[in-house]
């Protein structure tokens, strides 16, 4: 599968466009979703160029899932939530809109989530949540 270097998350990884970062290491980046399906909606992406879960080697995936686990823990401790939805879409046919592998961490009950990628959130609120979450990472 050919990877599109101009997708929005590739641009965020290069620093070409800004993001509210909550965590970064050599292999991964975690940042806020700007169209949150609930307060604290965070995305974790590998730095490896993969479009879907099928395009990443297992050793890279382990780093990504380690970050997913860290961020989930931070969401629970900083936002005081009991549950976090972990969502990951593969391919346009499944509703994937950004062709760089990513994991959605959404601290809310599945039944209460807002529409997917539907509406831009309050950027000041998202920024404040990013600071809160990153303080635990
Ligand atoms: P997908 O539909 O590919 O599973 O999820 C893509 C996610 O990226 C959506 O939840 C959408 O709100 C989010 N998104 C789209 N554009 C941007 C952007 O420019 N910055 C950030 N931080 N998130 C974005």
Image (cartoon, rainbow, N blue to C red):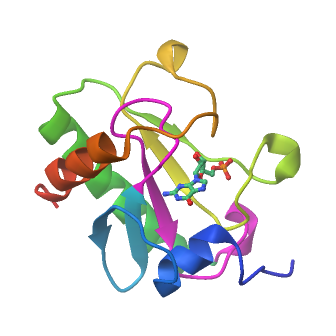
Question: Which x, y percent locates residue 82?
Answer: 25, 23
Q: Looking at the image, is 21 positioned above or below residue 89? A: below
Question: Which x, y percent locates residue 83?
Answer: 33, 26
Q: Looking at the image, is 20 positioned above or below residue 106? A: below
Which image quarter holds the C terminus? bottom left
Asked where in the image residue 135 lies, by quadrant, the reply is: bottom left
Looking at the image, which residue sits at the far top?
111
For residue 113, say whether it is visible.
Answer: yes
- Foreground residue among 129 and 51: 129
Residue at 58% of width from left, 70% of height from top?
A: 9
Q: Where does the magenta region start and end?
A: 32-56
Q: Looking at the image, is 107 positioned above or below residue 137? A: above
- Foreground residue among 57 and 35: 35
Which image quarter holds the N terminus? bottom right
Residue at 28% of width from left, 46% of height from top?
A: 124
Question: Which x, y percent locates residue 24?
Answer: 31, 75
Magenta stretch encompasses residue 74: no
Residue at 43% of width from left, 18% of height from top?
A: 109
> Which secondary structure dominates the residues rendered in magenta?
loop
- Foreground residue among 30 and 125: 125
Asked where in the image residue 53 lies, by quadrant, the reply is: bottom right
For residue 73, say whether it is visible.
Answer: no
Magenta stretch encompasses residue 55: yes
């Amino acid at each position: 599968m050919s990877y599109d270097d101009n997708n929005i998350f590739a641009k965020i990884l290069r620093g070409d466009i800004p993001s509210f970062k909550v965590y970064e290491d050599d292999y991964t980046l975690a940042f806020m979703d700007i169209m949150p399906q609930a307060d604290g909606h965070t995305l974790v992406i590998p730095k490896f160029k993969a479009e879907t879960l099928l395009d990443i080697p297992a050793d890279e995936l382990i780093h990504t899932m380690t970050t997913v686990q860290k961020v989930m823990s931070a969401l629970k401790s900083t936002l005081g939530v009991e549950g976090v939805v972990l969502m990951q879409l593969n391919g346009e046919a499944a509703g994937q809109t950004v062709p760089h592998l990513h994991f959605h961490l959404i601290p809310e009950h599945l039944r209460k989530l807002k529409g997917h990628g539907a509406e831009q959130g309050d950027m000041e609120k998202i920024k404040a949540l990013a600071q809160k979450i990153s303080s635990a990472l």
